[in-house]
Image: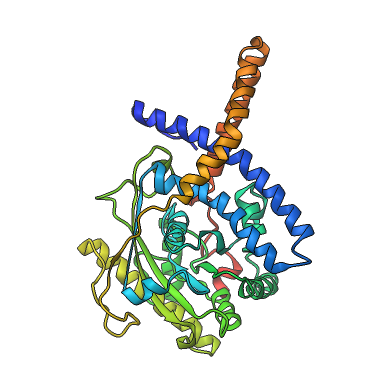
Amino acid sequence: MTVPVKNIKEAISFAGFVVIGLNFLITGMLINFFQLLLWVGLKPMSSTLYHKINYYLTYAVWGQMEFLAEWWSSSTCIVYTDDKTWAKMGSEHAILLLNHSYEVDWLFSWFLCEHVKMLGSAKAFVKKSFKKVPIIGWTALFSESAFLERSWEKDKSILENQITNMSKCPDPVMLHVFAEGTRYTPEKHAASVEFAQKSGFPPLKHLLVPRTKGFVLSVEKLRGKFPAIYCATMVFDTKEGAAPVFKSLVLGRPIAAEILVERIPLEDIPEDSDKISNWLHENYQHKDKMIDIFKTEGKFPTSLPGHHFEGPIRSHYRPRRLWTLLTIVITSFLTLPTVCCAFYSLFCSGIVNVVIGVVLLGLVVVALLKLMDLSSASKGSEYGHSPRAKAD
């Protein structure tokens, strides 16, 4: 993955990102090491204490990434909901049901969690291969996200165990569910439309037909344990902000995210598995309609009769908290002086060491670009070409 730099300002931004990224690589590995020690030594004795400590360790990793959105690029995330829902968010276990339409929607879902002070307890259903990714994947592992193999026979028991663990967490959990199972691309959308037509579902214009089995199991296992589902429809205003891609964040270009959130009590979701599945399809049809309205009118509706909004829908935005900034400042204070001294020694110790220093710096840049490449839409799983996709 390459990052096109158009001017001196963006070149400086990319250089700064490399410095921040180097700090992230070093501190992330150290944090993962401490998480491993706690996983082996503390968790078997006290799961509650493990979760309490790991909350802050996880925040120290996710907070560095969230810094790119909040502070480095000065991006915004505006939430549209009623006042009562906004007041409740952050105080209860909840499923966050999201559309997976953009390269950075996962990061802006963390932005939402940071708004409501739940970033350290954000969890998700992710691909099993993600577990092998240093720092990001390992942090998700230690924070007990669910890693799926895209095979229902294997995934069912994994989901059951992880969902049970999540319900026991002492702090409120925000479980991210991207029910489409993969990120939107034109090719996947064409396969989704074909699947919908064969299956008798209305084709979606902006989204993929959701996969239902994991969601159905989640609702069944979390009923009575998680009070609510937050149905979140995310869009990006490209007239006010930059393109919703990771490159924009790296180069300091602000992105403008807007999220429509409806709180639905879990007890209001049907109990029969087929009815839960139908409810999910109807919910994604509603999301698709909301996205279409936003693209046409430039805003979400201010009221939605027949839905769970208690009062008018209005914009909510909390000022940036200092914690993600402090995370960068504190970790940089601990790592960068040592790194600078090491590179200074290399560059001032002969041509061989200069070459070594350049190679090491190049490896850091490559490592960071590889991590960025994880967000590429082309790297997502296929849609409509696997037995699971057809079965769901």
Vertical placement of residue 276 versus 203, above or below: below
Vertical placement of residue 324 versus 207, above or below: above
Q: What residue sits 44% from the left and 64% below the top?
A: 116
Q: How is the image coloured?
A: rainbow
Picture quarter containing residue 82? bottom left
- Residue closest to the eye, 222 or 179: 222
Is residue 245 in sight in this rendering? no
Is residue 192 in sight in this rendering? yes
- Residue closest to the eye, 178 or 211: 178
- Residue closest to the eye, 228 or 37: 37
Picture quarter containing residue 165? bottom right
Q: Position of residue 59 (x, y in %)?
A: 56, 54
Please give left or right for residue 33 compared with residue 75 in the image: right
Please give left or right for residue 90 compared with residue 347 in the image: left
Q: Position of residue 182 (x, y in %)?
A: 51, 61
| Residue found farthest to the top | 350
Q: Considering the image in quadrants, where does the C terminus appear? A: bottom right
Q: Position of residue 142 (x, y in %)?
A: 67, 58
Please give left or right for residue 33 compared with residue 208 in the image: right
Q: What residue sits 60% from the left and 36% below the top?
A: 334
- Residue closest to the eye, 143 or 257: 143
Q: What residue sits 45% from the left and 87% below the top?
A: 268
| Residue found farthest to the left | 297
Q: In this figure, what is the number of numbered marks?
A: 0
Q: What residue sits 55% from the left and 32% below the top?
A: 365
Q: Position of residue 240 (x, y in %)?
A: 25, 50
